[in-house]
Amino acid sequence: MAKFIFVTGGVTSSLGKGIIAASLAKLLQSRGLKVTIQKFDPYLNVDPGTLNPYEHGECFVTDDGAETDLDLGHYERFLNLPTSQANNVTTGRIYQTVINREREGEYLGKTVQVVPHITDEIKRRMLLLGESDNYDIVITELGGTVGDIESLPFVEAVRQLQWELPEEDCMVVHLTLIPYLKAAKELKTKPTQHSVRMLSQEGVHPDVIVCRTEHPLSDEIRRKVALFCNVKPNAVIEALDASTIYEVPLKMLQEGLDVIVLKQLQINGYAAPELTKWRGFLDKLNYPKSRVKIGLIGKYIELQDAYKSILESFIHAGAMNQCKVQIVNVHSEFLTNENIADKLRDLDGLLVAPGFGNRGVEGKIIAVKYARENKMPFFGICLGMQMAVIEFARNVLGWQNAHSTEMDAITPYPVIALMEEQKKVKKKGGTMRLGAYPCEIAPNTLAHKIYESELISERHRHRWEFNNNYLNDFEHAGLLASGRNPDSKLVEIVELKGHPYFIGVQYHPELKSTVENPHPLFVNFVKAAGEFAELKIKIKISQGETIPS
């Protein structure tokens, strides 16, 4: 059986448990160990699929069609390995399983209780990934904060596992906060002490304490935390704020977090960390040779986590091009024909983001029209691709009332329509077209040039599709279906003839971009934006304008 590491959090949420877990996993992986990470979320939703992005950020989708927490995106981007449904478990899923078993009579008339029935199911799922030979170490991140009522069953399950498993097979890493009081000009350890004390009261004792802080920890502070939290001084790890999350593994390497873990778990004979590619990525990221401005057209821009994977994909693609990608958030709800030029003229590329519902769609359509007419590099994802289809239908084909039946059920030109198998669906959770599907790419197209392949696989999350009844009209007018599903013939990719870079995809390429394998669609989009920026400079110079250095 694999060895298990549990990552808990205290004091406040959003400290970065997912990044610490992913960073530790990356370091262990770099030493030749087989590592995976799983996330246990304390909310009662079965999965994040029905949550508003404002509630919980983006919904990350795995190859096997699971709608999961956005932290699984971090796991994949750091480890360059796919996750699955088994990597994300919620309280809702735990209770659903236990209640279904009770209804089936599996408990033989016993009173069903949080302990042992709920905690037993939590433990079963915690150990599940470690029961095969696929992994040496399983890292489990517990969502929420120690002290939350909803987190108690998970903490209790960890307590029981600490008691049941051999001491060298299980350990706890606790992430906490050491705030800096500006008025007193000093760091305060009391919140960390209380956090660890609260965890200890539940029977779980941390082996390592990772301290998020805005200022370096002195030896005195480390000794104080170690003394009052009952850990060794070298097990107090400093986690200073970093300029990018991708620096965190190297900071944890400097702190020796991976070595402490290996010693605690009694893992011997491990190799030195191999992080050459990671360091090369950071060098390109930190020392770009050019800069582009990309407009992100969306309706959830107030919360950056709503587009987390897209933003990270731009970081990967920017480093690949040795280019600094500056994202300019543009709220689609406030875009009009009157202000569109003022909002977008300084941009080098336009990405129209995915989403659901009617709010902000007209602004997205206006943005697509601007990119198409001004030869600006355009990239549409899911709903963004659908908006490109609607814009083309209205302004090129002349179908003024063309729309998606999602927004207009009685449109005379339903160029985007609900899939047949979706028309009978009543339950919203987990019923979309989810997970990885194949796509055949036509030769001599922009998509083929980007992918350098005729068959790809990408992840989906949607209900509405391009209406194939109108396909001939679109292709005759110049909007090509360059990628289609080989079985259903559903349109997966559209691109515009005669445009430098105009592509829309029905799937979500951002979900497969990693540090070591940036997604080619993002890489080529950033490259096209750079070429567009250079062209604009040449035009200004030819017109006698002075270009600032």
Image (spheres, rainbow, N blue to C red):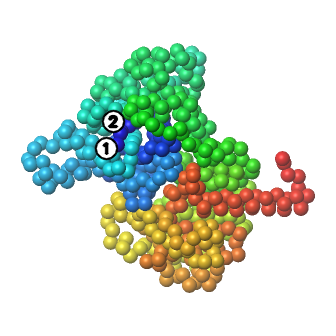
In this figure, what is the number of numbered marks?
Answer: 2
Kind of element beneath mark 1? loop
Q: Amino acid at mark 1?
A: Met
Three-letter amino acid code at the position of disc 2? Asp
Judge left or right: residue 385 versus residue 38: right
Q: Residue at x 49, y 48 (%)?
A: 79
From the top left corner, tell me how far across and down residue 450 is, in percent. Answer: 62, 67
Q: Which residue is mark 1?
A: 1
* The furthest residue to the front: 269
Horizontal relation, residue 499 to residue 38: left or right = right
Label 1 environment density (alpha carbons within 10 Å; few <14, some 14–19, many ≥20): some
Seen in the picture, residue 92 relative to 359 is either above or below; the reply is above
Element under disc 2: helix
Give the farthest residue toward the left.
109
Residue at image coords 29%, 33%? 166
Q: Quadrant of residue 379?
A: bottom right
Query: Residue at left 39%, top 27%?
Result: 207
Q: Is residue 321 left or right of residue 272?
A: right
Q: Position of residue 452 (x, y in %)?
A: 61, 69
- Residue 444 vs 240, above or below: the answer is below
In the picture of the structure, the residue carrying the numbered disc 2 is 169
Q: Is residue 102 visible?
A: yes
For mark 2, does the 10 Å Cα neighbourhood hold few (<14), some (14 to 19), or many (20 or more) residues? some
Q: Nearer the viewer, residue 395 or 317?
A: 317
Quarter of image, res 205: top left
Residue at 52% x, 74% y is 440
Query: The N terminus is located in which quarter?
Result: top left
